[in-house]
């Protein structure tokens, strides 16, 4: 696996990122900003990290590259990615988060933020070009003692929610917190308790656990159900490793898929426009809650671009979210004189709080609230260890060879529609959906499916993964 930019940030094996690459990619990022005149000598750059064993060492290399460029590294310590982004934005400064998000611990990555938010694809291109010119340099940076930000970034992040949601608004709710190795595992307890919920920490881990809210491990599914069976909870919540994707389960321990949590969030916040990738559930257009649903390619940079389009076209309230549940607040929200400012980066706490607020406000179980949106049953999975070129060959043939695709999908009644916006998303004549796309940051082929029932969605996912495996092996 080589280092590359995916749907959100630079990622790769720790063995490939540690050392010169972490230093030179950081140097390329700050040189990009310096070249545009947005960073001057002595400017601060904020740095955060997740709880992976490799993150502190990589963060030290990031600090060193910032200092060598004549800038001031500010160590924000271990904190959620949206907390770092919020703090840096408030200080009108760029930031770098050392995290591999949800991927296994043998991998890590860097997420880059300009002063005004996440970098875009143009920025990625400039960074890659500059890094290519300095990648052979073997740095031997002296140890750097960064400025320490202390607890202020986390305090501001918590205050964002505690000042918007009404005090004691979650009173009476009993919430399980699956802590595992999430960097948000303590702050989420503090915030929920601050809003009146009873919180019960669960499953705290001392080693890194790759919780992927878009493709839960079987172990996580079992844990959620076991905890729900053992105790009474109104919901069980968690996040991925860097705290920008939510995990929400109902009172039975059943996982509520991320795009459904995003839809609940948008409804609670009164959004008229939803911006979401093509991989989110097709029921969004039919549920009747939103005036407009704007579809994008998979990845937060594309969702942010879509938010800009919505605002330019006169949207009153915009909420963006991905199929993994990460919510990007596109426009400020006002409620009873309290303001929640926009934040154009993925966040996990906002959707968690909105889902819990819906339970408290409506006095109904989360499962009933979720059912109102009439989502098709969905499932997702992935084939690991699939080279990018193998995925490209399979997807290319599926998109361009109509006879080949028709023959494959005869078992589903044939093809009604093909969407090539990101990967190949096929709607069959029986109404079922099968969507294949290559991962943007790992050697994986991902498969997303929709069907009328959970059992059928599971069957369809098994069929889709078997199809992908067979076709790739035969190619």
Image (cartoon, rainbow, N blue to C red):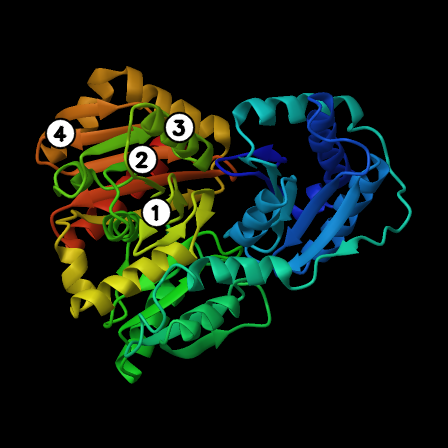
Going 72% across and 32% down the picture, which residue do you hit?
30
Task: Give the image quarter of residue 300.
Answer: top left
Task: Give the image quarter of residue 114.
Answer: top right
Q: Which residue is mark 3?
A: 308
Alpha carbons under labels 3 and 4: distance apart: 40 Å
Alpha carbons under labels 2 and 1: distance apart: 16 Å
In the picture, the disc for residue 275 is: 2
Q: In the displayed structure, does residue 292 sit left or right of residue 198?
A: left
Residue closest to the eye, 434 or 199: 199
Going 46% across and 67% down the picture, which residue do you hit?
188
**Crowding near the residue tagged with mark 4, few <14, some 14–19, many ≥20 C-alpha atoms within 10 Å:** few
Q: Which residue is mark 1?
A: 333
What SS does tag 3 mark? helix
- Asked if the residues shown at circle 4 and circle 1 are in contact, with their CB atoms under 8 angstroms apart, the answer is no
Q: In the displayed structure, does residue 450 sit left or right of residue 73?
A: left
- Asked if the residues shown at circle 2 and circle 3 are in contact, with their CB atoms under 8 angstroms apart, the answer is no
């Amino acid at each position: 696996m080589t280092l590359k930019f995916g749907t959100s940030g630079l990622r790769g094996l720790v063995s490939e990122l540690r050392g010169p690459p972490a230093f030179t990619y950081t140097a390329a990022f700050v040189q990009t900003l310096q070249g545009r005149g947005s960073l001057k000598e002595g400017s601060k750059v904020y740095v955060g990290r997740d709880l992976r064993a490799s993150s502190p060492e990589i963060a030290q290399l990031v600090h060193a590259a910032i200092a060598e460029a004549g800038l001031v590294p500010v160590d924000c310590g271990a904190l959620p990615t949206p907390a770092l982004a919020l703090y840096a934005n408030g200080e009108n400064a760029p930031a770098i988060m050392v995290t591999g998000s949800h991927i296994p611990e043998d991998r890590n990555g860097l997420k880059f933020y300009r002063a005004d938010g996440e970098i875009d694809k143009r920025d990625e291109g400039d960074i890659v070009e500059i890094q290519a010119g300095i990648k052979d340099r073997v740095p031997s940076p002296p140890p750097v003692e960064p400025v320490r930000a202390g607890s202020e970034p986390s305090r501001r992040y918590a205050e964002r929610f505690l000042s918007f949601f009404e005090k004691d608004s979650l009173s009476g709710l009993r919430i399980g917190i699956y802590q595992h190795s999430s960097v948000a595992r303590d702050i989420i307890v503090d915030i929920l308790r601050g809003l009146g919920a009873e919180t019960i920490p669960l499953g705290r881990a001392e080693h890194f656990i790759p919780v992927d809210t878009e493709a839960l491990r079987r172990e996580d599914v079992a844990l959620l159900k076991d905890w729900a069976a053992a105790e009474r909870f109104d919901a069980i919540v968690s996040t991925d490793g860097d705290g920008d994707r939510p995990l929400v389960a109902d009172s039975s321990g059943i996982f509520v898929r991320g795009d459904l949590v995003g839809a609940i969030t948008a409804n609670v916040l009164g959004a008229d426009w939803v911006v979401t990738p093509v991989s989110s559930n097709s029921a969004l257009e039919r549920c009747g809650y939103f005036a407009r649903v704007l579809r994008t390619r998979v990845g937060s940079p594309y969702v942010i671009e879509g938010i800009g389009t919505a605002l330019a076209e006169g949207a009153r309230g915009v909420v963006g979210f991905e199929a993994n549940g990460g919510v990007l607040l596109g426009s400020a929200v006002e409620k009873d004189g309290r303001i929640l400012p926009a934040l154009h980066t993925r966040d996990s706490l906002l959707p968690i709080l909105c889902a819990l607020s819906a339970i408290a406000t409506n006095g109904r179980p989360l499962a009933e609230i979720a059912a109102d949106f009439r989502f098709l049953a969905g499932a997702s999975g992935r084939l690991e260890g699939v080279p990018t070129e193998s995925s490209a060959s399979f997807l290319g043939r599926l998109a361009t060879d109509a006879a080949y695709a028709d023959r494959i999908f005869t078992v589903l009644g044939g093809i009604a529609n093909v969407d090539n916006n990101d990967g190949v998303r096929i709607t069959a004549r029986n109404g079922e959906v099968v969507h294949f796309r290559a991962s943007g940051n790992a050697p994986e082929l991902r498969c997303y499916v929709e069907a009328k029932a959970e059992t059928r969605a599971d069957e369809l996912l098994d069929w889709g993964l078997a199809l992908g495996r067979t076709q790739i092996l035969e190619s």
